[in-house]
Amino acid sequence: MAKKIPEIPAASLADIAFMLLIFFLVTTTMDVDSGLERRLPPMPPEDQNDQDTPPIKERNVFVVLVNANDQLLVEGEPLEVDQLRDKAKEFMANPNDSETLPEKNYKEVPYFGNIGISKGVISLQNDRGTSYGTYLAVQNELVGAINDLREELAEQKFGKTYDKLEGDQQDAIKEIYPSKISEAEPKKVGGK
Amino acid sequence: MSKFRKEGSKDLPPISTASLPDIVFMLLFFFMVSTTMREVTLKVQIHVPEATELSKLEKKSLVSYIYVGEPQKQFQKVFGSEPRIQLNDQFSQPEDILDFITAEREARDEAEVPMMITSLKVDEFAKMGIVSDIKQELRKASALHINYSSRKKSVAE
């Protein structure tokens, strides 16, 4: 008869597992990274002159300036950050085809037929002394304005939220409300 | 009357701890799956701003991080209290970004390179001057897809 092997004590297993657990608790992070996604423009080719770029009509440009004291100047008048979204939406949508707001380019878009697409461009310029918090708040409002418009159009045309649409439906809406935010290189004007 | 026998006359049997390892292992696996390893030690203080139009960073392996903020207390004697750039584990200059991006690219598969995202973790009170320098360097490195790291704004209305 074979000798009975004594059972391995399992009492210390808990201690070992606790040690591992604490190690992982200390060395890992749990936060989900999220943020505002943007694309930078590529570097211009070196042989490009300023004359090559076609001039843009003033009515088609939505100028947002931020100075070193974190104050906003939108289309020539001072504005608060929380008013910016409505102003940008009005500019991009131009519902009444107003003379002062951007022109529209009529074009065939799937699902929508012949529809006017705004030629508007949002131009953002900040100072080197602008604080990053303000800059991001402004960016957030501008991106939010375009997202809001897309959301409204999706709701009106398809009766669904933008996220739930099919790929080609999303593309059609993206074509009508493109995300045209251009950033000028910052100027150093006063301040430190 | 046996139901009303005096309490305490019998010792309670000890609670069995045989299932304790199982419970702890369950916790351990939960944390191993739901968390990510901390890769760098932060040498700068960062309090990212709030925003509403957020998108999540899906693939952690494709993200490279650039940190900008005030150096932490113990480094302030050497590096001052102006916001600085941190790449990997050290303080850097904007000119180092080009090398950093190249190194990050070489560490990844060739097929994954176009999908790489650079996440900028910048302190709320840093000035735009330093951020613009970084953006210019990123444009030079043609790492154009960026993400301004921010927290979800709690809607107070």
Image (tube, coloured by chain):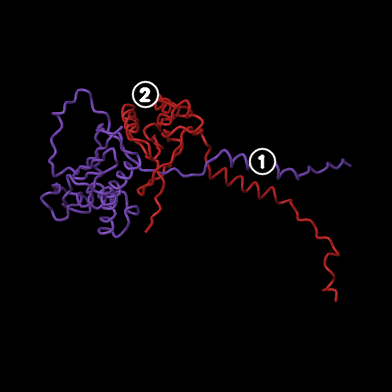
Chain colours: A purple, B red
Q: Residue furthest right?
A: A1
Q: Residue under circle 2? A: B95
Give the number of the mark in front: 2 or 1. 2
| Mark 2 surroundings: few (<14), some (14-19) or many (≥20) residues within 10 A | few
**Which quarter of the rendering shows the C terminus of chain B?**
bottom left
| B49 left or right, relative to A43 | right
**Residue at 27%, 28% in the rendered image:** A43
The vertical placement of A100 against B44, above or below, is below
**Which quarter of the rendering shows the N terminus of chain B?**
bottom right
Q: Amino acid at mark 1?
A: Met
How far across and how far down the image is residue B43, in percent? 48, 32
| Count of marks, rendered view | 2
**Residue at 38%, 56% in the rendered image:** B156
**Residue at 52%, 40% in the rendered image:** B36
A74 and B95: which one is in front? A74
Q: Residue under circle 1? A: A19
**Residue at 12%, 41% in the rendered image:** A57
Q: Quadrant of residue B104?
A: top left
Disc 1: which chain? A
Q: Residue furthest bottom?
A: B1
Disc 2: which chain? B
How far across and how far down the image is residue A46, in percent? 22, 23
Q: Quadrant of residue B12?
A: bottom right
**Disc 2 + disc 1, Cβ < 8 Å:** no
The vertical placement of B124 against A111, above or below, is above
A26 and A178: which one is in front? A26
| Mark 1 surroundings: few (<14), some (14-19) or many (≥20) residues within 10 A | some
Q: Amino acid at mark 2?
A: Glu
Q: Quadrant of residue B65?
A: top left
